[in-house]
Amino acid sequence: MRLSRRLLGAVGTKVSLEHSERIPTDNRILAVSNHRSVLDAPLLMAAMNRSVRFACHYYMSRVPVMRDVVSAMGGFPLDAPSQRQKHFFQNSISFLQARQVVGVFPEGAQPMVQVKSANQLSPFHRGFAHLALRAPVTDLTILPVAILSTEENKHQLAPLKLFRLFDPSEPLFNCGGWHPAIVYRRVHLHFGYPIQIDENLRQQYRGRHGTPLAKEITQSCWDQIDGMLQQGCN
């Protein structure tokens, strides 16, 4: 967390918060957010005033320097595709059981590689919802968070073909061009309504309604974050 604050101070990012009172104080937290900058993880840690264990894309554990930064900030890169889901579940459950906050960017790597406008949200993967419903812990809350950049600089990090050397399994790296790097100058963080994962939801998940329930929770988080992004632009 201290490293995150120093990093934000070094690049001069100005941060404002909305509805920070919605951050749970006692429950275990699974934070879910949109993602388009390497600053998203330190931003959330600074805003929540606590360390967060973030699930990161596999290639971030393979690229020198990037790997060191991710490790220093407590991120846990996902494994290679064949073991990705198992690795994600095992690590996340371990952190939640230790009452550490887990952070997930369910849009995946695409917004980091193919940057869209600040208020445009990509579809969510449903892994975080399945995690929340399966994790053998009590008092778990999903916290949707919207990160809205209002002023930023866009830099070129490295050619995409270079990243393909470290992770040939990622189809995004088969494209031409450069991997962008967004540096926020001014950014708003909006905290949504927490979603409590109780025993009733877990029982529904263990029954015939598992997949539809995970889809419903995923959509609820997407709707909240999208709504906050659009509201912030008005």
Image (cartoon, rainbow, N blue to C red):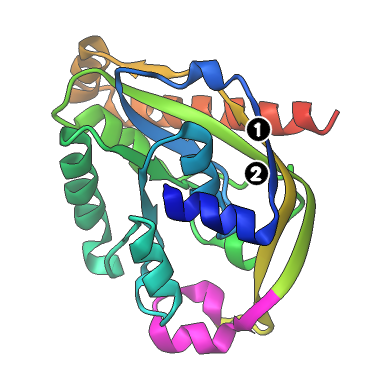
Using the rendered view, name the quadrant where residue 115 is placed.
bottom right
In this orientation, which residue lies closer to the viewer: 122 or 208?
122
Q: Mark 1 points at which residue?
A: 226
Left or right of 130 in this view: 68: right
Mark 2 to mark 1 CA distance (whole Å): 6 Å
Q: Which residue is drawn at 32% across and 31% down?
A: 211
Q: Which residue is drawn at 41% across and 18% down?
A: 195
Does the magenta-highlighted stretch encompass residue 163? yes
Can residue 189 be seen in this snapshot? yes
The crowd level at tag 2 (other Cα within 10 Å; few <14, some 14-19, many 20+) is many
Measured as percent of width and height from the top left, residue 44 is found at 51, 41
What amino acid does circle 2 point to?
Leu
Query: Which residue extends farthest right?
Result: 234
Q: Name the residue under label 2.
A: 121
Q: Give the range drawn in magenta.
A: 156-173
Please determine whether, in this image, residue 190 is positioned above or below residue 15. Answer: above
Can residue 36 be seen in this snapshot? no
Asked if the residue at tag 1 contacts the one at tag 2, i.e. Cβ–Cβ closer than 8 Å, the answer is: yes
Q: Residue at x 68, y 26 (%)?
A: 227
Q: Which mark is residue 57?
A: none
Count of number-bearing discs: 2
Left or right of 164 in this view: 17: right
Please determine whether, in this image, residue 78 is positioned above or below residue 117. Answer: below
In this orientation, which residue lies closer to the viewer: 166 or 170?
166
Measured as percent of width and height from the top left, residue 142 is found at 39, 26
First in sequence: mark 2 vs mark 1: 2
What amino acid does circle 1 point to?
Asp
Using the rendered view, name the quadrant where residue 179 is placed.
bottom right
Measured as percent of width and height from the top left, residue 231 is found at 77, 26
In this orientation, which residue lies closer to the viewer: 162 or 200?
162
